[in-house]
Structure formats: C-alpha cells, structure tokens
Amino acid sequence: MSTTALSRGAGSSYVSRSSSSGLYDVLDLLLDKGLVIDVFLRVSLVGIELLTVDARIVIASVDTYLRFAEAVNRLDLGTSEGEGLPNLMEDMTEGGASSKTKGVLEGAKEKIFGSGDEDGDEEKEDEDSGSSSGSRRRSSSSGSGSGSGSRSRARSSRGRSSSS
Amino acid sequence: MATKYIYGVVPATADLPSLPGIGGAQLELIAADGIAALASDGPRGDLVMGREAMTTHARVLEAAHALGTVLPMRFGVVMESEEQVIARLLAARHEELATQLEGFHGKAELRLRATYEEEAMLREVVREDQDVARLRDSLRGAPEDATYYGRIQLGELVARALERKRERDAEHIVQALSRLALAVEVTPPPHERIVLNASFLVDQSALAQFDAAVDQVGESQGGRMRFKYTGPLPPHSFVKFGPED
C-alpha cells in the first residue's frame, strides 16, 4: 500500500496527509468504530471512552466568546488584510488565539495516554516523513507549499511551549 | 488457556502481516469456514490498554488492509479462547462477516478533517458581518473591565457567524467529494475550529481521483482552512454488525 500511496498525486499545500501511525487522527475510529460484540467485550477500557467524550465537548461558553472577542479585537484589518502576513507571524497569532482550545484537547489526550509526550509525536507527524510507517505521508519539506515548512516549525514550538 | 485479542476479520486465505501484535505477541489467524479472525494471545491478568496497544491495533489493521480485505474490530476486543472466537464470532456471525468481506474488497476509508485558520476566518467574519464590525469598533481601545459584557456579546456573534459558515463549508466539501465515494460518514465536529470531520469509503480504483479532489478542495479554500487527510485505512466507519440474536 505504501507504493500506492507514494504515487498519489502532487497535492495541495493546504492538505497534509498521514497514515494511521498518527494515532491522534484515528483515535476516535479505534474507540468508536469497527465491529464490536458487546457481550464478548472482555477488556474494560478503564476511563478511555469517557475521556474521549471529554475531548469532544464543544466549547460554547463564556470563555470561548471572550477568546473570540479578544482574537477579533486583535486583528489589524488596516495593514494586513490580504496576503501580506508572513506565515510565521500568522501562526504565532493563531497559536495564541487557539491556545485555550488546544489546551483542553491536549489535556484530554494526556489523560488518555498517561504521559505528556504526545506533543513529540505531533511534531514528528508534521515534520518527519521518514518514520517507520509514515512512508505515505508527504512531509512539509517535500510539499509544494512554500510556507508549509515555517508553518510546522511554528506549530512545533507552540506545542513545546504550551506543554512546558 | 490463552485469551485472544482480536484485531479484525479477514478471508481465511489472507497473509499475516509481518509485525508483532499487542504486547509483542505473535499474530495468528483463527480460521473457520472461509473466514478468519486476525488475533494474537491476549495479555494476562488485568487488561490495562493504553497508547502503545492502540497504536499496535491501528498498525496491524493497516498492514492487513495493505495485504487484502480486513473488517476492523473496535479496539479492545478480547475473547476467552480460540474456541470462543470460532463459536461466538466466526460461526455465529459467519454470514454477515462473509458478506462484508466481499463487499469491502478493494475499498478503503479515507478521513478528512478540515480546520479553520482562525485568523483568516475572523477577518472574514468582521468583513462580512456588520454587527460584528460595529461592536468590535465600539470595544476597541476601551478598558477591559468596562467592556466585559460587550466582549461576551461580540464573541457570541462571532461564534454564531462561524457556526453558519461551518455548516455551509462542511456541506460544500462533502458535496465536492461524495460523488467519488461509495459512502460518507460525518462525525460531529469536536470543537469550534473544526469545519468537518468525515470518512469516505472509496474504491481503490478511484483513490487517485479522490486524492486529486481532496487537493482541489484544499486549493479552493485558499488558506481559509487546513486539511488533515488520513488513509487509506481499513473501513472502520463502515463495517457493521446487525443486532445480537
């Protein structure tokens, strides 16, 4: 299948691809989908199912509203409308604006997986195309987007700083 | 007697993926009447399964799918013995399993998650929604504690505008892709920046076309969204058991 995958199209710089080795992307599939015969389910997955429900709470709350308001107020429509902003800056701003959401989601992930090294994996997913089973993933460096490299670096550093 | 952890169901003639199962256990096929459970010896004692086991489950299924057809089990199914696997899974559900093995032959699940680029979207909202623009202007520069409720109101307006956009955008994306798919499963978005979380069942012969269509959708959104495209995966979202007898 990797061969099929490697030959798959030239791609869009807005689309990043991964296989199931990016566990976070298939977490809900593994937990909620697939064949199951309840009567014979012998493993009790203590906590795991509940925690993914936690991760799915849609955050429609005063906190979200205040965050949106803050983000909207911070927009500088006058100078940077259109395509002027370098990706890096855009991402830093976005990182700040979305830190709350990300925090909630990662908190849940951390609970599921025990330790906090999921961040490391996410970075790997973005930057490392040569990992063992990631052969069909198109890395940011081979992607056609000129901005994708700096984008994933910006995201990685955000990941590190938010986890410290 | 060893318990059996079940990854999925495959044709009895399937090749075994060449990787270890959960806890390093050897993968095996437990076959009966043309179909087989892809399994390995289950862990002993209390079963605490975490990240590593889930990753293994996903990789085994992915490898099996690369070799042929596999009906994925949900993570965490363990049965008491080989005999139980045959009696209660393979024999008891033989017809459903055989039918689905045939039906999913040569098909794959592809997942697409679209996430808004928040700043681009907020710009759009301010530009398009006059209420938002007005309220934003009235709040800018004012001291924080004097504008608490105003900011909540502004945020709520923005959230609603985004919700409307999300519905439109999600529908648009699904429409653009579903003509190349045999089936579509849309999962409710887990948080407010996610536009769409959907799985598409695609025939292998249409995979390249589907890839191109995804790229086209990506380009057509021109930086408003970022897409995460995962697969080809075994058909997790599309396999089904009828009610228990």
Image (cartoon, coloured by chain):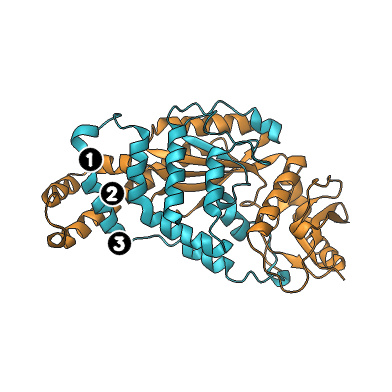
Chain colours: A cyan, B orange
Neighbours of disc 3 within 10 Å: few (<14), some (14-19), many (20+): few
Q: Are marks 3 and 1 in contact (CB under 8 Å)?
A: no
Image-quadrant location for residue B242? bottom right
Q: Distance between the Cα atoms at labels 3 and 1? A: 24 Å
Label 3 or label 1, whichever lies nearer to me, is: 3
Task: Tell me residue B234's x, y (percent).
Answer: 67, 47
Residue located at (77% from left, 54% from top)? B9
Decide which of tag 2 and tag 1 comes sooner along the chain: 1
Q: Nearer the viewer, residue B149 or A111?
A: A111
Q: Nearer the viewer, residue B100 or B18?
A: B18
- The answer to whether B105 appears left or right of B139 in the picture is right
Disc 1, SS: helix
Residue located at (24% from left, 33% from top)? A80
Q: Distance between the Cα atoms at labels 2 and 1? A: 9 Å
Residue on which disc 3 sits: A63
Residue on which disc 2 sits: B161
* Three-letter amino acid code at the position of disc 1: Glu
Q: Chain of mark 3?
A: A
Residue located at (71% from left, 39% from top)? B106
Residue located at (31% from left, 42% from top)? B119
Is residue B167 visible to us here? yes
- The answer to whether A5 appears left or right of B31 in the picture is left
| Residue lying at the far bottom of the rendered structure | B45
Q: Are marks 2 and 1 in contact (CB under 8 Å)?
A: yes
| Rendered view: B218 above or below B236 | above
* Three-letter amino acid code at the position of disc 2: Ala
Image-quadrant location for residue A154? top left
Residue on which disc 1 sits: B128
Task: Tell me residue A29's x, y (percent).
Answer: 60, 54
Quadrant location of the C terminus of chain A in the rendered image: bottom left
